[in-house]
Image (cartoon, rainbow, N blue to C red):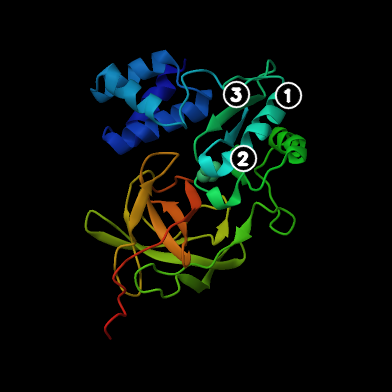
Amino acid sequence: MDTKGILEIIQRNGKNRAGLIAILEEIQAEYAYLPEAALRLVAKETGRSLADVYGVATFYKAFSLKPKGRHCISVCLGTACHVRGAQKIVEEFSQELGIKPGETTPDNEVTLETVNCLGACALGPTVVADGRYFPHVCKNKVNGIIDAAVKGLEHYDEKTDGRIFPLEVSCPVCRKSLMSPDHHIDGRPSVSLEVSLDGRRDRLHFSSLYGSRTPASGSEIPPSSVSRFHCPHCRNEIPCFSDCLECGSPMAALYIREGVVWEICTRRGCPGHMLNLRHINLHRADEGK
Ligand code: FES
């Protein structure tokens, strides 16, 4: 284990709870799991008990105490996906890869996992490979997903890749558009919000392409900080109804249409996002005018 490298990670991320999650994320990214020696070092250096660090490491699905393969495929077995045949999808992956859920192929290429809900129930059966969502998966798509994961999913083409699609969002309180035609990201109008942290307000722009990995821009909010999102029109805070599956931070719910929201993780740099079915009952800013 590279002790110096881990000490640098700890130094970079601070010692509060958000910092601890960021530390574990960086170690996980470096080693593809959390080695016991690294957890002991994190506990010692952050002044936390080993039980506390272990508790965080085992709470989030994104962390693993066992070495994982270079690519990770997660099949959702939540209720909505289950009733659409997700169990058969798991069996197909198991057969093609020659491993059971929770195992890694002998060449260390692919780890197969099952999860309880990926937050995209309307798109089920849903599979995530290396962080990329595959909707409406059927048995004959399984081989293609394995091939795509092994070849690498970092490069995508919006025109040919059905997992990437544009969204138009509004403020869930005043319903005014949050799209910014003057600030393009990924060749499209970006989503524009105000963010606040420790009394400081700033503007944030991010891609309106669902599934894009292009980083957000325009904000000085430091990486890994959890900020609050606000509508630039009515100034109300964008409400959060659930926590991010990747890091546990609150997810801000942007309005798409009645009963559908796009939830975005409020921690800077976290790729966590999901489409969700949710009826928002807020007192709208324009009511009574
Ligand atoms: S049940 Fe599968 S994404 Fe929610």
Q: Amino acid at mark 1?
A: Gln
Q: Position of residue 51 (x, y in %)?
A: 28, 18
**Mark 3 or 2, nearer chain start:** 3
In the rendered image, which quarter is residue 158 located in? bottom right
In the rendered image, which quarter is residue 97 located in? top right
Left or right of 30, for residue 19: left
Q: Position of residue 286 (x, y in %)?
A: 32, 80
Report the disc number at residue 101: 3
Q: Amino acid at mark 2?
A: Val
Residue, far bottom: 289
Q: Which residue is mark 1?
A: 95
- Residue placed at 38% from the left, 29% from the top? 59
Q: Is residue 198 above or below residue 152?
A: below
Look at the image and tell me whether residue 131 can be seen.
no
- Residue placed at 53% from the left, 68% from the top? 168
Q: Position of residue 288 (x, y in %)?
A: 26, 83
- Report whether the residue tagged 2 is closer than 8 Å to ligand 1: no
Q: Position of residue 173 (x, y in %)?
A: 34, 69
Q: Quadrant of the C terminus?
A: bottom left
SS type, badge 2? strand
Distance from the alpha carbon under mark 3 to that under mark 2: 13 Å
SS type, badge 3? loop
Q: Amino acid at mark 3?
A: Pro
Mark 2 residue crowding within 10 angstroms, few (<14) / some (14–19) / many (20+)? many
Report the disc number at residue 127: 2
